[in-house]
Amino acid sequence: MIPPSYSFRNIVSHKVTSALTILGIGLVVFVFTGSMMLTEGLKTTMVATGHDENVIAIRKASQTEVQSIVYYSQANILRTLPEIAVADNGSPLITNELYVLIGVKNRRSSDEAHVVVRGITDKSMVLRPNVKMIEGRMWQDAGSEIIAGKGASQRFVGCGLGETVRFGSRDWTVVGIFDAEGTAFDSELWGEYEQVSDAFNRPMYSSLTFRMNDTAQFAAMVKKIETDPRLPLDVKREKDYYESQSRTFSTFIGITGTVISIVFSLGAIIGAMITMYAAVANRITEIGTLRSLGFSRFSILTAFLFESLLIAFFGGAIGIVAALFLKSFQISTTNWDTFSEVAFNFDISWNIVITAIVFALIMGTMGGFLPAVRAARLKIVDSLRA
């Protein structure tokens, strides 16, 4: 077999053509990796919003809280379930919340975005230990004061500390900023449930969230609720619920990114093919010499194919490294499942890295195979004469 150093040396000796092909493949891998990182970032943000031991209940057949209505009578029945954990004071660890969308202008673009106003209770903070106040205070005058997520305070007009935002025919002052560790809650405004319900004239709940005594009892509890005609509710683990909220948009991003990457990859494949055909044309005599020294056609084919794979690997590595810088950027967009504005960062995982490298190697294989076959089929006499 021809040693791998032969392929490395040939890449170095043809710096310009190899570099252009590497950059072309790197650009395609950058786009491909970026689209996967965007999808991964949205999923990570949404899944992290849920707590492992929390369960959320919404109206049956509702896909999100914005579509859900849970009546007081249904909530009172649900509170009596023995599977719900109990606080130190003996009260059940369950919170009833209202979920409303309002229009607020973006600070940078002045475009109007849909922002979530969530009416919460004192149990809401207990059930979400990742939510911490970082500036200001909790409301004291619940009729006119709210707290804002860190992301919402930075992005939306009137949502910063001490600012005023109008909704529900009232002016509400932001008296505190909370940090939800980059989850979807960071893009929301929170107020006291009774006041938010009164402001929007909505005497009902959008959802009920509670902590379970034992998560292993989840399936039995769901079956109990499904067989109770008084509780037309869908009950899901909180992590599963929030993961489903990213499905439509993440699927769209994934499909769009893949299609764009495939289209771009055609150009990269052609570039790799041109590079390798040029390499074969410039080394015909060298190929004949290798054949005369006893190297088989298969050895010639694998050497040139390995050279193409090396070029693709270098391009893939450059594309992935470039995509890593996207982690410092935050994206704010409308979640198509909830119609609310959500902010999230690009995120990367080992699965994305491996997939991107495999994608690059596929391009290298497709671009280098035919030139490698061409090199392997050259006759020794004709090669030496050239």
Image (spheres, helix red, strand yellow):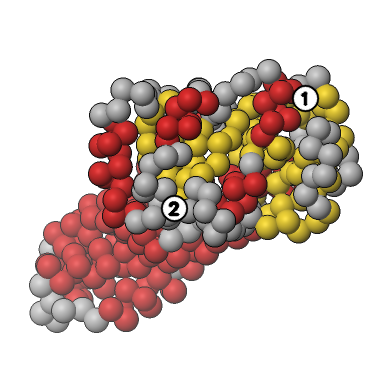
Q: Return the residue nearer the eye: 348 or 152.
A: 152
- How crowded is the residue under tag 1: few (<14 C-alpha within 10 Å), some, or many (20+)? some
- How crowded is the residue under tag 2: few (<14 C-alpha within 10 Å), some, or many (20+)? some
- Give the mark, 2 or 1, whose residue is nearer the N terminus: 2
Residue at x 74%, y 44% (from the top left corner): 148
Does 241 sit above or below residue 365?
Answer: above
Q: Nearer the viewer, mark 2 or mark 1?
A: 2
Q: Which residue type does callout 2 highlight?
A: Ala
The residue at the far front in this view is 90
Residue at x 23%, y 52% (from the top left corner): 370
**Residue position marked by numbered label 2 in the rendering:** 85
Q: Percent x, y for residue 15?
A: 48, 68
Does 192 sit above or below residue 314?
Answer: above
- Quarter of the figure that contains the N terminus: bottom left
Mark pair 2, 1: CA separation: 35 Å
- For residue 151, side relative to residue 274 (left or right): right
- For residue 75, side relative to residue 369 (left or right): right
Q: Percent x, y for residue 106?
A: 76, 34
Res 270 label: none
**Residue position marked by numbered label 1 in the rendering:** 167
Q: Which residue type does callout 1 highlight?
A: Phe
Q: Return the residue nearer the eye: 351 or 145.
A: 145
